[in-house]
Amino acid sequence: MSTFLLVGIVVLAFIIWVFNLLVKDRNQVLAAWSDIDVQLKRRHDLIPQLVTTVKAYADFEQATLTAVTELRSRSEAAPHLAEKAAVEDQMVSAIGKLVILAEDYPDLQADTNFRQLQSELTEIEDHIQYARRFYNGAVRVFNTRIQSFPNNLIARAQRFSEAEFFEVQQTTERQNPTVEID
């Protein structure tokens, strides 16, 4: 066997190996995004129940209830990840306002359904946070592989493009909390 043939086989094997790694990493990113999407759907399914429960007890802040419902619709219609992430950040803020406003109504706070919805919402938020971290980790691995030499040559030739991170948009979420001691 000639040296050129052996080198050609090694190079071809390397190209196939890198291509398969890129495909695996891309699929990992897509699967991770799917996990986030499932959790966001769970949150979206919970919102009408939460709004209905709060409405039954309190005829307050119609603007807040409307905002939560509108944000849910905008998030479901968002075509791009960055847009969806921005709307979801607004959603977290609006839901937080809804829960805080509900605290002014003791009957609502005592309602079993409301407490269950609040508990489910907290659980879903935890799952979303985990799914976001997993997704961003998969994006980091994928993007690093695409940017690394010689993988970048193969990635460019096969038209692999970098994935977007699912980043926190609200600056308040990036700040350290202040703890006051009486």
Image (cartoon, helix red, strand yellow):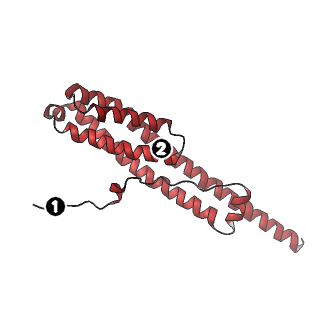
Question: What residue sits 28% from the left and 35% below the top?
Answer: 117
In the depicted structure, whether residue 56 falls above or below residue 28: above
- Toward the viewer: 103 or 70? 70
What's the mark number on residue 163? none
Q: Is residue 50 visible?
A: no
In the depicted structure, whether residue 177 falls above or below residue 38: below
- Mark toward the start of the polypeptide (1 vs 2): 2
Does residue 126 appear to the left or right of 154 in the view shown? left
Q: For numbered disc 1, what is the local secondary structure?
A: loop
Q: Is residue 55 visible?
A: yes
- Toward the viewer: 13 or 65? 65
Q: Residue furthest top?
A: 56
Q: Quadrant of residue 56?
A: top left
Residue 156: percent from left, percent from top: 70, 59
- Toward the viewer: 182 or 143? 182
Question: What residue sits 84% from the left and 70% below the top?
Answer: 6
In the depicted structure, whether residue 26 falls above or below residue 14: above
The residue indicated by pointer 1 is 180
The residue indicated by pointer 2 is 84
Does residue 97 appear to the left or right of 10 in the view shown? left
- Under mark 2, the amino acid is Lys
